[in-house]
Image (tube, rainbow, N blue to C red):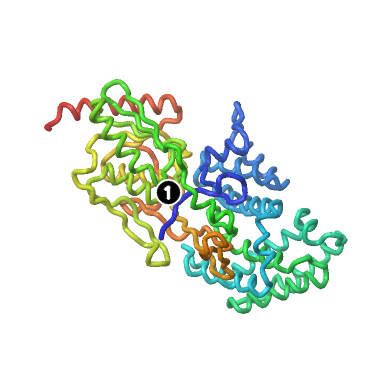
């Protein structure tokens, strides 16, 4: 079953990155009043990254990508910084590792086996998930952990720093170049590294080593995929109770509908709002504001698009598994509203919001005003690991100790164009937010006049 498609960053206290770029900036600090130039911002991002200020680096790289979607350094660096931030926060959170550290070593190694197999089965890009690559990424994660003060303090208490540095070099030399061609070999080598770590450094739990290899495999794929411990699996399923839309009436028989995010409740909220606007306010056109909407529930975005599309393709998902490959179409017929619409978008419009926007534009249901969207055209799903499942004493039901949020499909617009990268380019480009709103309202009023004067 396809879960929510969102731009998320586990472990950074960002609601598991249910936030998008705009909310991410709010979490890490407000944008300065006088914005630096693009070259200055790149130097700032590089400096943050060099000094291991991962959250600040993420914010800077996101701002660079918002202005220049084609900046390859920013995309690669963002993924790297996300991974380092995940590791740093994992090491600072004792609850994150509690379940894994309490498991028998054999179970943790079996979990590593399952992690590799499920990533290989479900990840959207098979070329990135060969056993050798996943093992190498796990090795890099562990080598980085040996340089992390928190990891050393918690797992290598009392060990001389020079001894850790020497051992790190020996691990790199002995196992870093080891050829690992299948899952069984990967598990065996990880067991060797873990045993050597305990023997040489007095590691308190070999499970800590295996966990680094597990997280390295999960977190190295892209900036949206990440390992999830049990407590975050629970958090992933939490639904919002707040309204996801805002509605006002504008002059000229225009309704203003702002969709803050897409959640399970959004289609019903939009449906009720449309009925009220038509019945009570005699609205004849809409401005739909998606600025700052970072996405949310993919199914909810598809169902919301159906409210505006009597027929036609909404989006196509392409992935390695049959259940991840599907053409989503609307069959709403005359139940879909025929109100003309203008959509507002910007660089913080991402993920499911982009799916909604391009579906309406390419089905000739709306014009887009603003700036190019973020460019996240991929779909994530929660893959749960069954190894060493535990039984909930309260409910008696089996629950997973861990899982992975994994990119399982690429998303294509109705015309077959990828959403990832350049994002959705508006029909009318305008950078000033106030001017964007004015243009959209002006166009909507004209659409309302045509709607009222047309044949009924």
Q: Position of residue 28 (x, y in %)?
A: 62, 38
Answer with the quarter of the image where residue 367 lies: top left
In the rendered image of this protein, does residue 87 appear above or below residue 434?
A: below
Residue in the image at 39% along x and 61% along y:
318
Neighbor class of circle 1 (other Cα within 10 Å; few <14, some 14-19, many 20+) is many
Residue in the image at 47% along x and 37% along y:
292
Q: Position of residue 308 (x, y in %)?
A: 27, 42
- The answer to whether residue 396 shows anywhere in this view is yes
Q: Which residue is mark 1?
A: 297
In the rendered image of this protein, does residue 417 appear above or below residue 19?
A: below
Give the quarter of the figure containing the C terminus: top left
Residue in the image at 62% along x and 47% along y:
12
In the rendered image of this protein, does residue 223 appear above or below residue 307?
A: below
Q: Position of residue 301 (x, y in %)?
A: 37, 46
Q: Position of residue 269 (x, y in %)?
A: 35, 39
Residue in the image at 64% along x and 36% along y:
40
Give the quarter of the figure containing the N terminus: bottom left
62 and 383: which is toward the camera: 383
């Amino acid at each position: 079953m396809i879960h929510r498609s969102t731009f998320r960053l586990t472990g950074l206290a960002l609601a598991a990155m249910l936030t998008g770029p705009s909310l991410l900036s709010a979490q890490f600090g407000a944008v300065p009043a006088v914005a630096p130039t693009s070259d200055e911002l790149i130097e700032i991002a590089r400096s943050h990254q060099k000094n291991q200020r991962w959250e600040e680096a993420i914010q800077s790289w996101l701002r660079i990508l918002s202005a220049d979607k084609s900046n390859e350094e920013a995309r690669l660096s963002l993924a790297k910084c996300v991974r380092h931030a995940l590791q740093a926060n994992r090491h600072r959170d004792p609850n994150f590792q509690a379940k894994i550290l309490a498991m028998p070593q054999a179970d943790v190694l079996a979990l590593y086996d399952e992690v590799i197999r499920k990533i290989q089965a479900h990840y959207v890009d098979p070329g990135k998930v060969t056993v050798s690559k996943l093992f190498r990424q796990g090795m890099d994660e562990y080598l980085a952990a040996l340089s992390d003060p928190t990891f050393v303090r918690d797992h290598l208490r009392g060990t001389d720093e020079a001894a850790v540095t020497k051992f790190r070099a020996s691990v790199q030399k002995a196992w870093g170049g080891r050829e690992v061609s299948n899952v069984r070999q990967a598990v065996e080598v990880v067991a060797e590294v873990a045993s050597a770590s305990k023997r040489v450094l007095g590691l308190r739990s070999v499970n800590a080593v295996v966990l680094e290899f597990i997280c390295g495999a999960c977190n190295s794929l892209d900036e949206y995929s990440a390992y999830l411990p049990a407590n975050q699996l629970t958090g992933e399923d939490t639904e919002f109770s707040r309204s996801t839309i805002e509605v006002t009436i504008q002059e000229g028989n225009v309704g203003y509908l702002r969709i803050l995010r897409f959640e399970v409740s959004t289609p019903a909220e939009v449906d009720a709002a449309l009925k009220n606007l038509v019945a009570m306010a005699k609205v004849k056109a809409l401005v739909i504001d998606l600025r700052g909407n970072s996405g949310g529930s993919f199914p909810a975005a598809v169902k919301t698009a159906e409210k505006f599309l009597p027929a036609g393709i909404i989006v196509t998902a392409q992935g390695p598994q049959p259940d991840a490959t599907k053409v989503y179409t609307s069959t709403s017929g005359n139940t879909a509203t025929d109100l003309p619409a203008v959509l507002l978008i910007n660089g913080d419009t991402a993920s499911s919001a982009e799916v909604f926007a391009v579906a309406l534009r390419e089905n000739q249901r709306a014009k887009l005003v603003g700036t190019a969207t973020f460019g996240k055209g991929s779909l994530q799903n929660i893959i749960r690991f069954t190894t060493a499942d535990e039984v909930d004493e309260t409910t008696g039901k089996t629950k997973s100790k861990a899982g992975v949020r994994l990119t399982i499909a690429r998303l294509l617009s109705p015309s077959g164009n990828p959403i990832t990268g350049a994002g959705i380019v508006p029909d009318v480009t305008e950078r000033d937010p106030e001017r964007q709103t004015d243009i959209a309202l002006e166009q909507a009023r004209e659409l309302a006049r045509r709607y009222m004067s047309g044949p009924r």
